[in-house]
Amino acid sequence: MSHRMNQTDRERPSYPIGPVLEHYGFDAVDHDRGWRDIRCAFHGDRNASGRVRSDDSTEQVYYCHAYRECPNGNAVQIIMKKEGLAYRDAVIRATEITGVGDGEVRRSGGPRDAVPRKSRTESKVSAFKRTWLRD
């Protein structure tokens, strides 16, 4: 069974979860261990109430079973919740913490896709002139 990459897979960067969790005070996370229990540093856990998946077969994630207020998810989602950053800034921060990737996020849409605004001197018709018809 082959996995076809869709556009979302190509644009969304993936980062290792271990360095991000360790940055926030977690014990070392062994890479490529699958699911394992871990103490949650977000709420000062004495018991292992968190679970981390650190294998390369799927996206690496963390989840705390004790408190809903603890940041959960992949590396970028945890950074967004912990530091209050927007997605683009969290991707750059994940690059800084993990040393993986180039920190660039492609924009979807933007000025080249926007409907042009008419200038004050243009009429309503000329602002949306049919450019595919010959004059």
Image: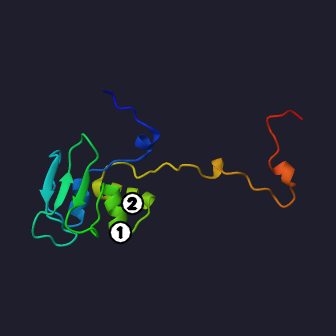
- Disc 2, SS: helix
Residue 73 vs residue 50: left or right? right
Q: Are marks 2 and 1 in contact (CB under 8 Å)?
A: yes
Q: Which residue is mark 1?
A: 83
Q: Which residue is mark 2?
A: 90
Residue 115 vs residue 78: left or right? right
Looking at the image, residue 79 lies above or below residue 116 = below
Determine which of the numbered discs, if any, sits on residue 130 in the image. none
Q: Amino acid at mark 2?
A: Ala
Query: Residue at horizontal 81%, vertical 51%?
Result: 127
Mark 2 and mark 1 lie on one chain; the one further toward the N terminus is 1
Quadrant location of the C terminus?
top right
Q: Position of residue 52 (x, y in %)?
A: 19, 54
Quarter of the image where one finds residue 75: bottom left
Query: Residue at horizontal 31%, vertical 61%?
Result: 78
Looking at the image, residue 122 lies above or below residue 80 = above
Disc 2: CA contacts within 10 A as few (<14), some (14-19) or many (>=20): many
Quarter of the image where one finds residue 5: top left
Disc 1: CA contacts within 10 A as few (<14), some (14-19) or many (>=20): few
Whether residue 46 appears in this view of the structure is yes
Q: Position of residue 40 (x, y in %)?
A: 18, 65
Q: Position of residue 95 (x, y in %)?
A: 34, 54
Looking at the image, residue 129 lies above or below residue 72 = above
Residue that lies at the very extreme toward the right in this rendered image: 135
Residue 18 vs residue 92: left or right? left
